[in-house]
């Protein structure tokens, strides 16, 4: 099961690399690859689909001492905030999350956060909190959160 989900993640990753999109910052490319630190910790890929919308996917692991593999995919909307330099935006979205461990969990998530694109470099710094409703195997609440950085190419 873990191998098939890693294959699906890889296909989504490749698909997002080919999306014709526009990043918030004209100095940055369309697709950003980086790291997220928190719960969970791993790699993240973001691809812009318009000036204010993007898809974000993550492949990570839990720091809680388990051998959990974590995957999420979100559609995000960005609302620009005024700053003197760079590009700052509040973002929100909707997505799905899967955790593969002894049990497999599937749920919906609502990412909320702040994203800052640097003015002179193709870098994005972000802070995110995502309330989660697990739907399988049981219905319960959870949360993801962390900080991250992405390099746009």
Image (tube, rainbow, N blue to C red):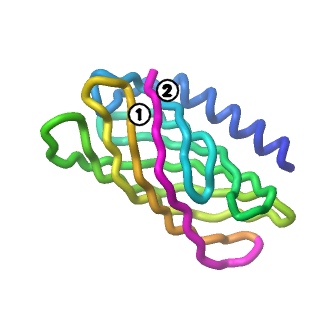
The crowd level at tag 2 (other Cα within 10 Å; few <14, some 14-19, many 20+) is some
Evaluate if marks 1 and 2 touch, with contact meaning CB atoms under 8 Å apart.
yes
Report which residue position mark 2 lands on: 19
Task: Give the SS element for disc 2.
Answer: loop
Asked where in the image residue 123 lies, by quadrant, the reply is: top left
Is label 1 or label 2 in front? 1
Front one among 36 and 76: 36
* Marks 1/2: CA–CA distance: 8 Å
Mark sitting on residue 48 = 1
Residue at 67% x, 78% y is: 139
- Residue at horizontal 34 percent and vertical 34 percent from the top: 50
| Quadrant containing the C terminus in the rendered view | top left
Q: Is residue 146 magenta?
A: yes
Circle 1 — which element? Answer: strand
- Would you place residue 151 above or below residue 112 in this image? above
Q: Residue at x 53, y 31 (%)?
A: 33
Image x and y of residue 111, in percent: 46, 58
Residue 38 x %, y %: 56, 56
Residue at 34%, 52% (x, y): give it: 114
Mostly what secondary structure, the magenta segment?
strand
Ranked by sequence position, the earlier of labels 1 and 2 is: 2
Q: Magenta residues?
A: 137-153
- Left or right: 32 as drawn, with respect to 39: left
């Amino acid at each position: 099961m873990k191998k098939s989900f890693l294959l699906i993640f890889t296909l989504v990753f490749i698909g997002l690399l080919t999306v014709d999109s526009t990043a918030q910052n004209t100095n940055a490319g369309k697709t950003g690859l980086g790291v997220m630190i928190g719960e969970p910790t791993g790699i993240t890929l973001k691809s812009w689909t318009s000036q204010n919308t993007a898809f974000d996917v993550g492949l990570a692991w839990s720091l809680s001492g388990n051998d959990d593999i974590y995957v999420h995919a979100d559609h995000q909307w960005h609302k620009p905030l005024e700053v003197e330099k760079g590009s700052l935006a509040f973002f929100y979205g909707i997505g799905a999350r899967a955790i593969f461990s002894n049990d497999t969990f599937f749920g919906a998530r609502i990412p909320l956060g702040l994203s800052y694109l640097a003015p002179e470099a193709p870098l994005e710094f972000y802070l995110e909190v995502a309330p989660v409703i697990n739907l399988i195997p049981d219905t319960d609440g959870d949360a993801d959160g962390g900080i991250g950085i992405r390099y746009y190419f």
